[in-house]
Structure formats: structure tokens, C-alpha cells
């Protein structure tokens, strides 16, 4: 697939960020704590600056919503959503469940996503209407149509464990064929590739999942919040699955 100008810039930005991130990975650096008690490192900040510079040079009129460097012109027709290191806790603990997430929203609709995981040597991308790819190979979700036969991966269950949905989740978990907790970018790559069938998460930020939503959807999946609602800047949960299972899981919850 010949990438569009938007996708080419996003892929270039992800590659540049990977160079910064891997320079610091498994090295000594200072770790600071943000107001939400999440960690931030020099790798987070430097990689987002690189991404922001590449995007702003290419598209000076576009908006930018970054995890570390903030928001600018977020009411623009085109808005870039960037998390330079989604999985900073993993990065700090020196295991490779971290990624760079770059998404493009046009008039409130997610239309492009790049998910770069240099520790795994995986690069996934998608554009609306043009399919999804992982390391150049086209992705497609599974055709499993039964909860009893599906593989489910969960992440960030703290909110669900303390809320009214915990009992419903327990009943669902008891039905599925296999339970996993891959977390972060990885279970969405697996979902889009047809290797697992359902992902449930709470306590997410739109920057964590925007790019992944485009990738899963372009692979034929359905990606909503836990109530079946459309994604937006305030989204905090995920129900993602192949199209045959999404409605069944939503009803079960």
C-alpha cells in the first residue's frame, strides 16, 4: 500500500521516536512522577518533542494533543493524538511492553493510526478505508463466533474490580476458552492479527488507544468503550473484538 502523506509523516515520526527511546532503554536515567502518579522520563519527553517537530513541520495548521508536551489548536480540522511511550512503567522496569502511539483525528473521527513497539520489533499502521498492516503484512481479525471458544485479554482491571461490572466480568471470564492479560499495545496487535478475539480494558486514556482503534477497525474488528459507545477524547475504557463477538460480549457485560 502506498502511504498517504499523513501516514508517511506519522511513520517517519514513529521511526525517529524509536531511535530516541531505544537509546535510553535499559540505561540509567532520572524518573519523575506526574500529578496523576504515573512516571515520566527523559525518553518520554524527548521522543514526543521529536514527533511534534516532524508533524508540525509537515502540517503547521494541524492541532496537536500530546501526553507530555500538551495541547495546541485542538479544535483544528486535523488533530494529532500522541503518546510517545505508552507503557512507561514497563519501559522503566526494563521489559518491552511499551510503544509509541500516533493517531490522526479529522473532524472528531479517527482516520489514521501508527503503533510502534521497538522493543518487540513490531510496527502496525492503518488508514481509514485502506486496511491495517503489521510489519508490512495485512491484518485481519478472527472469525471465532462463540464466547465459549474465544480468547479474551484484559488490562487495567482496577476500576472494574471496584465497580458494579465485576460480577458480570467474572461470569464472562468463566465462559471463555482462554484468559490472558497481555496489556498495553500488545493485545490489540494480537486482536487485529486474529490471534486473540476480545480485549477489555478500563483506566485508559484516549492517547493510549486512538491509533490502536484505527488498526483494529481496519482489520475488521469493532472498537468501542465498555458501554458500546463511540470513542472520544474523554474515553476511559475499551471493548474491542471481532465483529461476530462484540455484541455478545457487550450483552454479557
Image: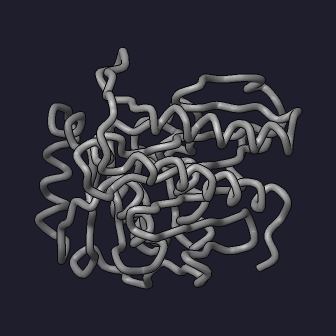
Splitting the image into 4 quarters, where does residue 148 fall?
A: bottom left
Question: Does residue 80 appear to the left or right of 77 in the view shown?
Answer: left
Splitting the image into 4 quarters, where does residue 232 fall?
A: top right
Q: Give 213 or 176, whichever is nearer the viewer.
A: 213
Q: Is residue 118 above or below residue 145?
A: above
Which residue sits furthest top?
35
Q: Which coloring applies here?
A: one colour
Q: Image point 77% across, 31% down: which residue?
A: 63
Q: In this view, does 39 lie above or below 180?
A: above
Q: In this view, does 126 lie above or below 168?
A: below
x and y, in percent, of residue 227 in the image: 41, 44
Q: In which quarter of the image is the N terminus?
A: bottom right
Q: Image point 85% across, 59% down: which residue?
A: 5
x and y, in percent, of residue 13 in the image: 67, 51
x and y, in percent, of residue 154 in the image: 26, 56
Q: Give 53 or 171, whichever is nearer the viewer.
A: 53
The total number of labels drawn is: 0
Q: Give 97 or 147, whichever is nearer the viewer.
A: 97
x and y, in percent, of residue 85 in the image: 45, 44
Question: Does residue 179 appear to the left or right of 120 in the view shown?
Answer: left
Amino acid at each position: 500500500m502506498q502511504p498517504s502523506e499523513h501516514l508517511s509523516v506519522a511513520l517517519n515520526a514513529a521511526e525517529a521516536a524509536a531511535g530516541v527511546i531505544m537509546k535510553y532503554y535499559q540505561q540509567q536515567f532520572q524518573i519523575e512522577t506526574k500529578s496523576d502518579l504515573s512516571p515520566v522520563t527523559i525518553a518520554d519527553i524527548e521522543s514526543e518533542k521529536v514527533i511534534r517537530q516532524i508533524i508540525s513541520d509537515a502540517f503547521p495548521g494541524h492541532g496537536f494533543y500530546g501526553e507530555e508536551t500538551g495541547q495546541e489548536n485542538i479544535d483544528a480540522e486535523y488533530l494529532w493524538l500522541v503518546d510517545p511511550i505508552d507503557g512507561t512503567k514497563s519501559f522503566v522496569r526494563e521489559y518491552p511492553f511499551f510503544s509509541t502511539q500516533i493517531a490522526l483525528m479529522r473532524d472528531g473521527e479517527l482516520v489514521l493510526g501508527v503503533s510502534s513497539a521497538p522493543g518487540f520489533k513490531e510496527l502496525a499502521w492503518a488508514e481509514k478505508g485502506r486496511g491495517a498492516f503489521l510489519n508490512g503484512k495485512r491484518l485481519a481479525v478472527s472469525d471465532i463466533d462463540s464466547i465459549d471458544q474465544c480468547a479474551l485479554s484484559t488490562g487495567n482491571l482496577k476500576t472494574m474490580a471496584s465497580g458494579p461490572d465485576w460480577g458480570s466480568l467474572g461470569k464472562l471470564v468463566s465462559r471463555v476458552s482462554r484468559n490472558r492479560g497481555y496489556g498495553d499495545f500488545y493485545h490489540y496487535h494480537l486482536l487485529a492479527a486474529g490471534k486473540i478475539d476480545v480485549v477489555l480494558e478500563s483506566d485508559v486514556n484516549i492517547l493510549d488507544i486512538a491509533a490502536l482503534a484505527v488498526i483494529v477497525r481496519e482489520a475488521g474488528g469493532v472498537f468501542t468503550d465498555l458501554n458500546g459507545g463511540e470513542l472520544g477524547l474523554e474515553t476511559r475504557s475499551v471493548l474491542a473484538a471481532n465483529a461476530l463477538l462484540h455484541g455478545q460480549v457487550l450483552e454479557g457485560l
